[in-house]
Amino acid sequence: MTLCVTELNDREENENHFPIIYGIAVNVKTAEIYRASFQDRGPEEELRAARALTGGPMISIYDAKTEQLRIGPYSWMPFPHVDFWLQQDDKQILENLSTSPLAEPPHFVEHIRTTLMFIKKYPSPKNTLFPGNKALLYKKNEDGLWEKVSSPES
């Protein structure tokens, strides 16, 4: 499901609009809802970000029944002018690759640069990052850390 908060999650500062809360999380076992703040962004962050930046639609990668992340396989069209964007200063990246430049968190530009470098390095991810065209699977271990598990046979 998708939750759209719109104007209810808005605050104004110097005539600019910012979200009150940047994200929420839901404990799928207890249905508890709380403010999300992620130190660990999960496995394959660059791969998932590259998929989004190249126009991939929003999808759920978590399977609550198996308690696993299923990532891919993905492919994308070549990103236009990736070298050009990598040469731009922070202000240009923020103003041109953000939908809300004034409200972005401090790590936004660094995240976009890292994602662009990933796209440049892996222009055909299906061939290089998904052996046998299989998804990458991750499950949390006893310490709460994501570990790669065997890919499915499909």
Image: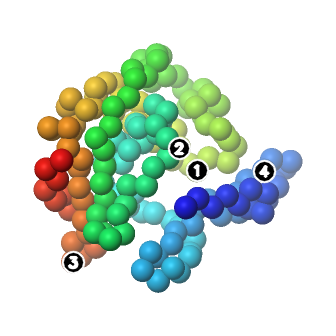
Q: Position of residue 136 (x, y in %)?
A: 23, 49
Instruction: Quickly name the residue at label 4.
Output: 17
Q: CA distance from mark 2 to mark 4?
A: 17 Å
Q: Is 144 rendered above or below residue 17?
A: below
| For discs 2 and 3, the disc positioned in front in the rendered view | 3
> Of helix, strand and loop, which one carries label 4?
strand
**Residue occupying the far bottom of the picture:** 30
| For discs 3 and 4, the disc positioned in front in the rendered view | 3
Q: Is residue 5 left or right of residue 80?
A: right
**Residue occupying the far front of the picture:** 154
- Numbered tag placed on residue 108 in the rendering: 2
| For discs 3 and 1, the disc positioned in front in the rendered view | 3
Instruction: Quickly name the residue at label 1.
Output: 105
State which quarter of the image contains the N terminus: bottom right
Q: CA distance from mark 3 to mark 1?
A: 31 Å
Of residues 101 and 23, the one drawn nearer to the viewer in this rendering: 23
The amino acid type found where label 4 is placed reads His
Q: CA distance from mark 4 to mark 1?
A: 14 Å
Instruction: Quickly name the residue at label 3.
Output: 142
Callouts 3 and 1 close, C-beta under 8 Å: no
